[in-house]
Image (spheres, rainbow, N blue to C red):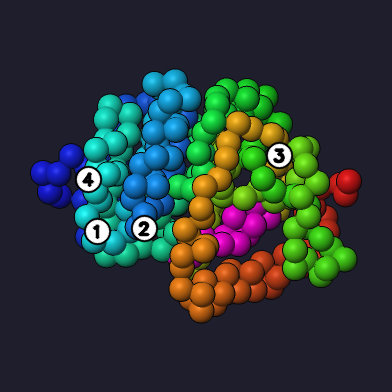
């Protein structure tokens, strides 16, 4: 490990702990480029959350972190994995080593515009739902499970990783994200259905959040994006399609 103001490892398997401090909740991000945008997202979190909300970030690959490095402080932790690591494996490490009982999986393109943490933590602490998020929906069974329909706030089959707050223990018990998901897209759908299969309930709500340009989608090589997205969705269809018993009531 280097003397940099953040942890740096060659491989994700070398990570053992992020911090010994315990927080009310932890916000987890995986970042691979566009560091100024990620820094702006982190700044929005700090401006709209209490000091006992940690921010944990895994940076995939050997990069000059630029603006992001200056965001390290008493509650913001960066871990750089110099050998590039897939999105699912990186997010699982952030779940496993989270310094809190509740973890928000969040995309760097998402920005806080107000206090989004208080309402989701209140909902999670009711212990009826293992995941609470901002955007999601119901699997479209008429479309042979190939799409998700946003029905607005309420109980859902799927939440998206733009902002997904989790009961950490429930997420880990459901085996978290698939490490074969090297790319983020559709990995959240697969994980949501794993939670449903484990009898976890998911809740979608309106929150004071906004999304800036989603570099992970729009600025990724199109062939790579489409190939990896399809691989992730093919696993969903192979494992879950037709298992209507795991779905919430239609609405």
Residue 245 position in % (x across, y down)? 83, 55
Instruction: Classify 113 as above or below 9.
Output: above
Disc 3 versus disc 2: distance between alpha carbons? 27 Å
Q: Nearer the viewer, residue 62 or 67?
A: 67
Asked whether residue 130 appears in the rendered view, the answer is: no
157 sits to left or right of 219: right
- Compared across the picture, whether 8 is left or right of 186 comes to left
Residue linked to disc 3: 204
Residue 121 position within the rendered picture, expressed as x and y whole percent measured from the top left: 58, 26
Mark pair 3, 4: CA separation: 34 Å
x and y percentages locating residue 146 in the rendered image: 75, 68
Is 27 magenta? The answer is no
Q: Please say if the residues under marks 3 and 4 sit with CB atoms less than 8 Å apart.
A: no
- Judged by depth in the image, the label closer to the viewer, 3 or 1, is 1
Q: Residues within 10 Å of mark 3 (few under 14, many from 20)?
A: many
| Residue at position x 41%, y 63% in the image | 86
> Which badge, 4 or 1, is on the more N-terminal residue?
4
**Separation of disc 4 and disc 1 at Cα?**
13 Å
Q: Please tell me whether mark 1 sits on a helix, a strand or a loop.
A: loop
Q: Is residue 229 left or right of residue 68?
A: right
State the SS at label 3.
strand
Choose mark 4 or mark 2, whichever is in front: 2
The earlier-in-sequence mark between 3 and 1 is: 1
Query: Label 4 belongs to which residue?
Result: 7
Crowd class of label 2 (few under 14; some 14 to 19; many from 20; radius 10 Å): many
Q: Name the foreground residue: 7 vs 66.
A: 66
Which range is magenta? 182-196
Magenta: main secondary structure equals: helix
First-in-chain label (3 vs 2):
2
Find out whether the residues at labels 1 and 2 contact each other: C-beta distance under 8 Å: yes
The reply to whether residue 183 is visible in this rendering is yes
């Amino acid at each position: 490990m280097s003397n940099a103001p953040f942890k740096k490892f060659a491989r994700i398997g070398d990570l053992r702990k992020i911090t010994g401090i315990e927080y009310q909740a932890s916000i987890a991000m995986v970042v691979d480029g566009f560091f100024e945008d990620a820094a702006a997202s982190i700044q929005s979190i700090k401006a709209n959350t209490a000091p006992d909300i940690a921010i944990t970030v895994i940076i995939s690959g050997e990069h000059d972190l630029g603006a992001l490095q200056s965001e390290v402080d008493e509650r913001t932790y960066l871990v750089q994995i110099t050998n590039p690591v897939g999105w699912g494996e990186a997010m699982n490490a952030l779940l496993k080593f989270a310094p809190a009982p509740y973890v928000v999986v969040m995309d760097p393109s998402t920005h806080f515009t107000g206090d989004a943490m208080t309402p989701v933590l209140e909902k999670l602490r009711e212990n009826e739902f293992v995941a609470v998020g901002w955007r999601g929906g119901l699997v479209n069974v008429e479309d042979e499970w190939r799409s998700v329909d946003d029905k607005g706030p309420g109980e859902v089959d799927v939440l998206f990783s733009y902002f997904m707050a989790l009961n950490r223990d429930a997420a880990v018990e459901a085996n978290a994200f698939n490490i074969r998901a090297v790319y983020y897209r559709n990995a959240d759908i697969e994980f949501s259905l794993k939670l449903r299969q484990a009898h976890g309930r998911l809740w979608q709500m309106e929150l004071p959040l906004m999304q800036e340009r989603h570099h992970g989608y729009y600025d990724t090589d199109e062939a790579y994006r489409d190939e990896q997205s399809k691989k992730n969705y093919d696993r969903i269809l192979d494992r879950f399609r037709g298992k209507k018993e795991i779905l919430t009531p239609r609405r």
